Image: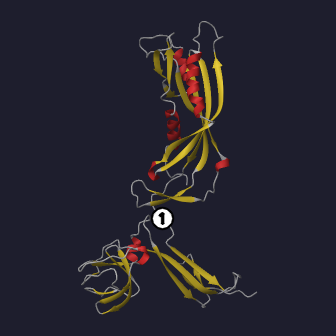
Amino acid sequence: MLGTYYYHEIIRRTIIAFGTLFNEIDIHHKKPDGSDFSVIRVPIAYGPTEKFLARLEQKPDLRKRVAITLPRLAFEMVSIRYDNSRKVSTMQTFKALSTTDNKIVKKVYMPVPYNLGIRLSIMAQYNDDALQIVEQILPIFQPAFNLTVDLVSSIGERRDIPMVLDNISFKDNYDSGYDEKRTIIYDLDFTAKTYLFGPIPDSTEGFIKKVQVDYYTDTNKVNASRQLRYVAEARAVQDYNEDHTSALTQDIDTNVTQFTVSNTTSLVVNTYIAIDDEEMLIKSIDGNRLTVLRSQDGTKVASHINGTYINLVNNLDTELLPQTDDFGFSDYIYDYGDGKVYSPTKGVDVWKRILKI
Protein backbone atom coordinates (compact mmCIF):
# COMPACT_ATOMS: atom_id res chain seq x y z
CA MET A 1 0.00 0.00 0.00
CA LEU A 2 2.72 2.47 1.00
CA GLY A 3 4.78 3.56 -1.98
CA THR A 4 1.76 3.99 -4.28
CA TYR A 5 1.60 7.70 -5.04
CA TYR A 6 -1.74 9.45 -4.86
CA TYR A 7 -2.84 12.92 -3.80
CA HIS A 8 -6.49 13.92 -3.93
CA GLU A 9 -5.97 17.37 -2.30
CA ILE A 10 -8.87 16.63 0.07
CA ILE A 11 -7.46 18.54 3.06
CA ARG A 12 -6.58 21.50 0.84
CA ARG A 13 -10.01 21.48 -0.82
CA THR A 14 -11.77 21.34 2.56
CA ILE A 15 -9.79 24.26 3.96
CA ILE A 16 -10.35 26.36 0.84
CA ALA A 17 -14.08 25.60 0.92
CA PHE A 18 -14.15 26.71 4.56
CA GLY A 19 -12.45 30.01 3.72
CA THR A 20 -14.91 30.79 0.92
CA LEU A 21 -17.72 30.92 3.48
CA PHE A 22 -16.36 34.20 4.84
CA ASN A 23 -15.04 36.04 1.78
CA GLU A 24 -18.08 38.31 1.32
CA ILE A 25 -18.46 39.88 4.76
CA ASP A 26 -18.90 43.66 4.89
CA ILE A 27 -18.98 46.18 7.73
CA HIS A 28 -20.81 49.52 7.59
CA HIS A 29 -19.80 52.79 9.25
CA LYS A 30 -22.74 55.08 9.86
CA LYS A 31 -23.19 58.84 9.92
CA PRO A 32 -25.12 60.46 12.78
CA ASP A 33 -28.23 60.48 10.59
CA GLY A 34 -28.02 56.70 10.10
CA SER A 35 -26.86 56.70 6.49
CA ASP A 36 -23.77 54.78 5.41
CA PHE A 37 -20.51 56.67 5.68
CA SER A 38 -18.44 53.79 4.31
CA VAL A 39 -18.79 50.11 3.45
CA ILE A 40 -15.70 47.94 3.87
CA ARG A 41 -15.28 44.42 2.51
CA VAL A 42 -13.39 42.53 5.21
CA PRO A 43 -10.30 40.84 3.71
CA ILE A 44 -9.53 37.22 4.57
CA ALA A 45 -6.30 35.25 4.20
CA TYR A 46 -4.87 31.92 5.29
CA GLY A 47 -2.25 32.11 8.02
CA PRO A 48 -1.72 32.31 11.78
CA THR A 49 -3.03 35.34 13.67
CA GLU A 50 0.45 36.13 15.01
CA LYS A 51 1.70 36.72 11.47
CA PHE A 52 -0.82 39.50 10.88
CA LEU A 53 -0.36 40.99 14.34
CA ALA A 54 3.37 41.25 13.67
CA ARG A 55 2.64 43.09 10.44
CA LEU A 56 0.46 45.53 12.36
CA GLU A 57 3.38 46.50 14.57
CA GLN A 58 5.76 47.18 11.69
CA LYS A 59 7.12 50.70 11.49
CA PRO A 60 6.62 52.63 8.25
CA ASP A 61 9.34 51.89 5.71
CA LEU A 62 9.23 53.13 2.12
CA ARG A 63 11.12 50.05 0.96
CA LYS A 64 8.45 47.65 2.32
CA ARG A 65 4.79 47.13 1.68
CA VAL A 66 2.27 49.27 3.52
CA ALA A 67 1.33 47.80 6.91
CA ILE A 68 -1.94 45.90 6.97
CA THR A 69 -5.08 47.46 8.35
CA LEU A 70 -7.97 46.24 10.46
CA PRO A 71 -10.58 44.73 10.44
CA ARG A 72 -9.32 41.47 8.94
CA LEU A 73 -10.08 37.75 8.98
CA ALA A 74 -7.49 34.98 9.18
CA PHE A 75 -7.95 31.20 9.25
CA GLU A 76 -5.64 28.21 9.61
CA MET A 77 -5.75 24.47 10.26
CA VAL A 78 -4.71 23.78 13.85
CA SER A 79 -5.34 20.03 14.22
CA ILE A 80 -6.25 16.81 12.46
CA ARG A 81 -7.60 13.75 14.25
CA TYR A 82 -9.31 10.46 13.46
CA ASP A 83 -13.08 10.29 14.09
CA ASN A 84 -13.90 6.82 15.40
CA SER A 85 -17.64 7.60 15.63
CA ARG A 86 -17.95 7.67 11.80
CA LYS A 87 -15.89 4.55 11.16
CA VAL A 88 -17.17 1.92 8.68
CA SER A 89 -15.78 -1.44 7.63
CA THR A 90 -12.31 -1.16 6.08
CA MET A 91 -13.28 -3.76 3.44
CA GLN A 92 -16.52 -2.08 2.38
CA THR A 93 -16.47 -0.70 -1.17
CA PHE A 94 -18.71 1.21 -3.55
CA LYS A 95 -18.76 1.71 -7.31
CA ALA A 96 -18.09 5.07 -8.93
CA LEU A 97 -18.08 6.25 -12.54
CA SER A 98 -14.88 7.69 -13.94
CA THR A 99 -15.31 11.37 -14.85
CA THR A 100 -13.10 10.92 -17.95
CA ASP A 101 -15.00 7.90 -19.33
CA ASN A 102 -18.51 7.20 -18.08
CA LYS A 103 -18.27 3.62 -19.33
CA ILE A 104 -15.58 2.83 -16.74
CA VAL A 105 -16.73 1.89 -13.25
CA LYS A 106 -14.13 1.93 -10.49
CA LYS A 107 -14.23 -0.02 -7.25
CA VAL A 108 -13.45 2.39 -4.42
CA TYR A 109 -12.84 1.56 -0.78
CA MET A 110 -14.81 3.53 1.78
CA PRO A 111 -13.01 6.69 2.95
CA VAL A 112 -11.52 7.21 6.39
CA PRO A 113 -13.24 9.83 8.59
CA TYR A 114 -11.04 12.63 9.92
CA ASN A 115 -11.84 15.85 11.76
CA LEU A 116 -9.93 18.97 10.74
CA GLY A 117 -9.61 21.63 13.41
CA ILE A 118 -9.81 25.07 11.80
CA ARG A 119 -9.54 28.39 13.62
CA LEU A 120 -11.07 31.57 12.26
CA SER A 121 -9.72 34.76 13.82
CA ILE A 122 -11.53 38.10 13.64
CA MET A 123 -9.16 41.05 14.18
CA ALA A 124 -10.51 44.55 14.59
CA GLN A 125 -9.48 47.87 16.11
CA TYR A 126 -12.99 48.87 17.13
CA ASN A 127 -15.41 46.72 19.08
CA ASP A 128 -18.36 47.62 16.84
CA ASP A 129 -16.46 46.41 13.76
CA ALA A 130 -15.76 43.08 15.45
CA LEU A 131 -19.36 42.68 16.59
CA GLN A 132 -20.68 43.36 13.08
CA ILE A 133 -18.54 40.51 11.78
CA VAL A 134 -19.43 38.14 14.63
CA GLU A 135 -23.16 38.68 14.21
CA GLN A 136 -22.95 37.87 10.49
CA ILE A 137 -21.26 34.53 11.24
CA LEU A 138 -22.80 33.03 14.37
CA PRO A 139 -26.43 32.65 13.20
CA ILE A 140 -25.27 30.49 10.26
CA PHE A 141 -23.84 27.80 12.54
CA GLN A 142 -26.40 26.05 14.77
CA PRO A 143 -23.86 24.72 15.57
CA ALA A 144 -23.06 23.16 12.17
CA PHE A 145 -23.31 24.23 8.54
CA ASN A 146 -23.07 21.66 5.72
CA LEU A 147 -20.76 22.58 2.88
CA THR A 148 -20.59 20.52 -0.33
CA VAL A 149 -16.98 19.76 -1.26
CA ASP A 150 -15.65 18.02 -4.38
CA LEU A 151 -13.38 15.55 -2.57
CA VAL A 152 -12.11 13.34 -5.44
CA SER A 153 -12.40 14.80 -8.93
CA SER A 154 -11.46 11.59 -10.79
CA ILE A 155 -14.68 9.85 -9.66
CA GLY A 156 -16.85 12.92 -9.10
CA GLU A 157 -17.09 12.24 -5.37
CA ARG A 158 -18.92 15.15 -3.72
CA ARG A 159 -19.95 15.07 -0.07
CA ASP A 160 -21.61 17.39 2.41
CA ILE A 161 -18.98 18.25 5.01
CA PRO A 162 -20.38 19.56 8.33
CA MET A 163 -18.52 22.64 9.61
CA VAL A 164 -19.20 22.58 13.34
CA LEU A 165 -18.64 25.65 15.53
CA ASP A 166 -17.11 24.32 18.77
CA ASN A 167 -15.88 27.32 20.74
CA ILE A 168 -15.57 31.12 20.77
CA SER A 169 -12.89 33.03 22.67
CA PHE A 170 -12.21 36.76 23.01
CA LYS A 171 -9.05 38.82 23.58
CA ASP A 172 -8.55 42.59 23.90
CA ASN A 173 -5.21 44.31 24.55
CA TYR A 174 -6.95 47.56 25.58
CA ASP A 175 -4.97 47.65 28.88
CA SER A 176 -1.58 47.04 27.26
CA GLY A 177 -0.57 50.71 27.16
CA TYR A 178 -0.68 53.77 24.93
CA ASP A 179 2.35 52.66 22.92
CA GLU A 180 0.51 49.66 21.42
CA LYS A 181 -2.31 49.61 18.90
CA ARG A 182 -5.56 48.26 20.25
CA THR A 183 -6.45 44.90 18.70
CA ILE A 184 -9.67 43.03 19.44
CA ILE A 185 -9.52 39.35 18.51
CA TYR A 186 -12.34 36.81 18.37
CA ASP A 187 -11.17 33.21 17.83
CA LEU A 188 -13.83 30.85 16.45
CA ASP A 189 -12.83 27.17 16.57
CA PHE A 190 -14.45 24.88 14.00
CA THR A 191 -14.37 21.16 13.22
CA ALA A 192 -14.65 20.09 9.58
CA LYS A 193 -15.87 16.47 9.47
CA THR A 194 -14.24 15.39 6.22
CA TYR A 195 -13.19 12.07 4.68
CA LEU A 196 -9.83 10.94 3.30
CA PHE A 197 -9.72 8.52 0.36
CA GLY A 198 -6.97 6.06 -0.42
CA PRO A 199 -5.67 5.30 -3.92
CA ILE A 200 -8.30 4.98 -6.67
CA PRO A 201 -7.47 2.08 -9.04
CA ASP A 202 -7.23 2.91 -12.73
CA SER A 203 -8.47 -0.53 -13.80
CA THR A 204 -11.86 -2.14 -13.33
CA GLU A 205 -10.39 -5.46 -12.18
CA GLY A 206 -12.20 -7.09 -9.30
CA PHE A 207 -15.74 -7.05 -10.72
CA ILE A 208 -17.38 -10.46 -10.52
CA LYS A 209 -18.46 -11.87 -13.90
CA LYS A 210 -18.80 -15.53 -12.94
CA VAL A 211 -20.14 -17.33 -9.86
CA GLN A 212 -19.71 -21.05 -9.28
CA VAL A 213 -21.31 -22.98 -6.39
CA ASP A 214 -20.88 -26.70 -5.61
CA TYR A 215 -23.52 -28.46 -3.52
CA TYR A 216 -22.56 -31.40 -1.31
CA THR A 217 -24.50 -34.32 0.16
CA ASP A 218 -23.28 -33.72 3.72
CA THR A 219 -22.05 -30.91 5.93
CA ASN A 220 -18.93 -32.94 6.67
CA LYS A 221 -16.33 -31.00 4.69
CA VAL A 222 -13.78 -33.83 4.88
CA ASN A 223 -15.71 -36.74 3.38
CA ALA A 224 -18.68 -35.02 1.70
CA SER A 225 -19.14 -35.70 -2.02
CA ARG A 226 -20.40 -33.03 -4.37
CA GLN A 227 -23.63 -33.75 -6.25
CA LEU A 228 -24.53 -30.52 -8.02
CA ARG A 229 -22.79 -27.46 -9.49
CA TYR A 230 -24.49 -24.17 -10.33
CA VAL A 231 -22.69 -21.64 -12.55
CA ALA A 232 -23.90 -18.12 -13.41
CA GLU A 233 -22.02 -15.93 -15.88
CA ALA A 234 -22.60 -12.37 -17.03
CA ARG A 235 -23.89 -12.20 -20.59
CA ALA A 236 -24.20 -9.32 -23.03
CA VAL A 237 -27.77 -8.56 -24.09
CA GLN A 238 -26.88 -6.47 -27.13
CA ASP A 239 -24.33 -6.48 -29.93
CA TYR A 240 -21.13 -4.45 -29.49
CA ASN A 241 -18.82 -5.59 -32.32
CA GLU A 242 -21.22 -5.35 -35.30
CA ASP A 243 -20.10 -8.68 -36.79
CA HIS A 244 -22.76 -8.59 -39.59
CA THR A 245 -22.98 -12.40 -39.56
CA SER A 246 -26.08 -12.52 -41.77
CA ALA A 247 -28.91 -10.36 -43.10
CA LEU A 248 -32.68 -10.47 -43.52
CA THR A 249 -34.02 -11.48 -46.93
CA GLN A 250 -37.56 -10.30 -46.18
CA ASP A 251 -39.44 -7.68 -44.22
CA ILE A 252 -40.72 -8.83 -40.82
CA ASP A 253 -43.34 -7.19 -38.62
CA THR A 254 -43.85 -7.49 -34.86
CA ASN A 255 -45.80 -10.78 -35.13
CA VAL A 256 -43.39 -12.78 -37.28
CA THR A 257 -41.42 -15.57 -35.54
CA GLN A 258 -40.17 -17.32 -38.71
CA PHE A 259 -38.19 -15.61 -41.47
CA THR A 260 -35.44 -16.25 -44.01
CA VAL A 261 -31.89 -14.94 -43.88
CA SER A 262 -28.99 -14.78 -46.30
CA ASN A 263 -26.68 -17.18 -44.45
CA THR A 264 -27.02 -19.54 -41.47
CA THR A 265 -23.50 -21.01 -41.44
CA SER A 266 -22.45 -19.20 -38.20
CA LEU A 267 -25.87 -19.32 -36.52
CA VAL A 268 -26.53 -21.87 -33.76
CA VAL A 269 -29.73 -23.00 -32.08
CA ASN A 270 -30.29 -21.59 -28.55
CA THR A 271 -28.01 -18.63 -29.12
CA TYR A 272 -28.89 -14.95 -29.32
CA ILE A 273 -28.92 -12.59 -32.28
CA ALA A 274 -29.57 -8.84 -32.57
CA ILE A 275 -31.53 -7.17 -35.36
CA ASP A 276 -31.43 -3.40 -34.97
CA ASP A 277 -32.09 -2.91 -31.20
CA GLU A 278 -34.14 -6.11 -30.74
CA GLU A 279 -32.58 -9.25 -29.30
CA MET A 280 -33.91 -12.68 -30.35
CA LEU A 281 -33.26 -16.31 -29.34
CA ILE A 282 -32.88 -18.86 -32.15
CA LYS A 283 -35.10 -21.90 -31.48
CA SER A 284 -34.56 -23.81 -34.74
CA ILE A 285 -32.81 -23.56 -38.11
CA ASP A 286 -34.20 -25.11 -41.30
CA GLY A 287 -32.00 -24.26 -44.27
CA ASN A 288 -32.06 -20.46 -44.39
CA ARG A 289 -35.21 -20.19 -42.29
CA LEU A 290 -35.01 -19.26 -38.61
CA THR A 291 -37.60 -19.78 -35.89
CA VAL A 292 -37.01 -17.34 -33.03
CA LEU A 293 -38.34 -16.00 -29.76
CA ARG A 294 -38.75 -12.23 -30.07
CA SER A 295 -37.93 -9.33 -27.68
CA GLN A 296 -35.49 -11.12 -25.36
CA ASP A 297 -33.90 -9.62 -22.23
CA GLY A 298 -36.28 -6.69 -22.09
CA THR A 299 -35.69 -5.43 -25.64
CA LYS A 300 -38.72 -4.13 -27.52
CA VAL A 301 -40.26 -6.02 -30.42
CA ALA A 302 -40.09 -4.01 -33.65
CA SER A 303 -40.49 -4.28 -37.40
CA HIS A 304 -37.37 -4.80 -39.54
CA ILE A 305 -36.83 -4.38 -43.26
CA ASN A 306 -35.24 -6.62 -45.89
CA GLY A 307 -31.42 -6.34 -45.90
CA THR A 308 -31.02 -5.43 -42.21
CA TYR A 309 -27.86 -6.95 -40.74
CA ILE A 310 -28.09 -9.78 -38.20
CA ASN A 311 -25.42 -9.66 -35.48
CA LEU A 312 -24.46 -12.41 -33.07
CA VAL A 313 -24.72 -11.69 -29.35
CA ASN A 314 -22.07 -13.99 -27.89
CA ASN A 315 -18.96 -14.17 -25.73
CA LEU A 316 -17.15 -11.64 -27.92
CA ASP A 317 -19.78 -9.07 -27.01
CA THR A 318 -19.59 -10.04 -23.33
CA GLU A 319 -15.85 -9.24 -23.40
CA LEU A 320 -16.72 -5.75 -24.68
CA LEU A 321 -19.52 -5.27 -22.14
CA PRO A 322 -19.19 -1.83 -20.47
CA GLN A 323 -19.58 -1.89 -16.69
CA THR A 324 -22.41 0.64 -16.85
CA ASP A 325 -24.61 -1.22 -19.38
CA ASP A 326 -27.38 -3.64 -18.49
CA PHE A 327 -26.47 -7.30 -18.84
CA GLY A 328 -28.08 -10.70 -18.40
CA PHE A 329 -26.96 -14.03 -16.97
CA SER A 330 -26.39 -17.44 -18.43
CA ASP A 331 -26.82 -20.14 -15.79
CA TYR A 332 -25.93 -23.82 -15.92
CA ILE A 333 -26.59 -26.77 -13.63
CA TYR A 334 -24.36 -29.87 -13.64
CA ASP A 335 -24.96 -33.19 -11.87
CA TYR A 336 -21.86 -34.77 -10.35
CA GLY A 337 -20.99 -37.96 -8.52
CA ASP A 338 -17.35 -38.36 -9.47
CA GLY A 339 -15.82 -37.54 -6.09
CA LYS A 340 -13.87 -34.56 -7.46
CA VAL A 341 -13.70 -31.02 -6.04
CA TYR A 342 -12.91 -27.69 -7.65
CA SER A 343 -9.39 -26.37 -7.02
CA PRO A 344 -9.35 -22.53 -6.96
CA THR A 345 -5.56 -22.50 -7.35
CA LYS A 346 -5.50 -24.77 -10.41
CA GLY A 347 -8.84 -23.65 -11.85
CA VAL A 348 -9.92 -27.24 -12.61
CA ASP A 349 -11.64 -30.16 -10.89
CA VAL A 350 -9.27 -32.51 -9.04
CA TRP A 351 -9.67 -35.84 -7.25
CA LYS A 352 -10.45 -35.48 -3.60
CA ARG A 353 -8.71 -37.64 -1.06
CA ILE A 354 -11.32 -39.24 1.22
CA LEU A 355 -10.18 -39.62 4.81
CA LYS A 356 -11.48 -42.49 6.92
CA ILE A 357 -12.71 -41.57 10.39
Q: Which residue is mark 1?
A: 205
Of 165 and 194, the residue lying toward us: 165
Label 1: which secondary element: loop
Q: Residue furthest right?
A: 357
Mark 1, other Cα within 10 Å: few <14 / some 14–19 / many ≥20: few
Q: Give the residue displayed 46% in from the left and 60% down from the top.
A: 105
Q: Is residue 258 left or right of residue 11?
A: left
Q: Is residue 238 left or right of residue 142?
A: left
Q: Give the residue displayed 63% in from the left and 8% down from the top.
A: 177
Q: Position of residue 345 (x, y in %)?
A: 56, 75
Q: Give the residue displayed 50% in from the left and 27% down from the top.
A: 45
Residue 302 in view in this figure: yes
Up-down: is 202 above or below 79?
below
Residue 236 in view in this figure: no
Up-down: is 329 above or below 190?
below
Q: Amino acid at mark 1?
A: Glu
Of 296 and 352, the residue lying toward us: 296
Q: Position of residue 132 (x, y in %)?
A: 56, 22
Location of the C terminus by quadrant is: bottom right
Q: Quadrant of residue 130?
A: top right
Q: Position of residue 356 (x, y in %)?
A: 73, 88
Location of the N terminus by quadrant is: bottom right
Up-down: is 163 above or below 353?
above
Q: Residue furthest top?
A: 178
The image shows a total of numbered marks equal to 1
Q: Position of residue 26 (x, y in %)?
A: 49, 23
Q: Give the residue displayed 55% in from the left and 87% down from the top.
A: 334
Q: Quadrant of residue 260?
A: bottom left
Q: Quadrant of residue 298?
A: bottom left
